[in-house]
Amino acid sequence: MPVPTQPAKSALLVIDVQKGLFEKSTPIYKADALLENINSLIDRARQAGVPVLFIQHSSSKILEKGSDGWQLHPRVQPLADEPIIHKLHGNAFEDTTLQEELTKRKVSSVVVTGLVTHGCVKATCLGALDLGYQLVLVSDAHSSYSKDASQMIEKWNNALHEKGALLQQTRQVKFL
């Protein structure tokens, strides 16, 4: 008789929810709902004892390190003991300590939320899959500032699902 495997230990990744992205001329699609969904996931992860890791992008434009736009959105803030991973590339695993932090916590499944769908969310999801993580993409907890954001979100939900991501809405996510 086969021995049941342990369920995957998860972590919540909150990608690039930074002030500057909310201040662009084209607004974040469904910004209020996005922030509510991400905060719901953060609260539920914390209650379940699941690690929450915040990812913060730096670039030479609106997300210049240390600038006001680079700061995390005031409605999405880490606790003192929650890591903030600083990155320079779209994929949050590239040239960062993210994989080390996940390994230290024995995480094998990542739940992904944040900004922007067709950039850092997509790149980090693909990076997680390449590294062998189980991936849950929260289909209603990532967004973009594109005028075509609705179609872009649908496109990348489908494309990442085809590559191995499990799609779940915020209310469906169960943390282990």
Image (spheres, rainbow, N blue to C red):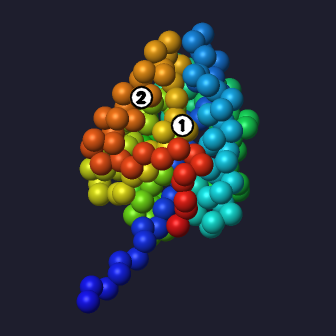
The quadrant where residue 24 appears: top right
Q: Which mark is residue 67?
A: none
Is the residue 136 above or below the residue 25 in the image?
Answer: below
* Disc 1: which residue: 140
The residue under the point 62% across, 67% down is 49
Q: Position of residue 81 (x, y in %)?
A: 66, 60
Residue type, numbered disc 1? Asp
Instruction: Give the farthest residue toward the right.
Output: 74
Q: Which mark is residue 154?
A: 2
Q: Is residue 123 shown left or right of residue 41?
A: left
User: How far apart, in angstroms, are the residues tagged by discs 2 and 1?
Assistant: 10 Å
Q: Which of 88 and 165 is in front in this view?
A: 165
The residue under the point 62% across, 42% down is 38
Q: In which quarter of the image is the N terminus?
A: bottom left
Q: Can residue 94 be seen in this view?
A: no
Is the residue 153 above or below the residue 172 in the image?
Answer: above
Mark 2 and mark 1 in contact? Answer it, CB < 8 Å.
no
Callout 1 environment at 10 Å: few (<14), some (14 to 19), or many (20+)?
many
Q: Is mark 2 on a helix, strand or loop?
A: helix
Q: Nearer the viewer, residue 171 or 40?
A: 171
Is the residue 10 above or below the residue 141 in the image?
Answer: below
- Name the N-terminal-most of marks 2 and 1: 1
Callout 2 environment at 10 Å: few (<14), some (14 to 19), or many (20+)?
few
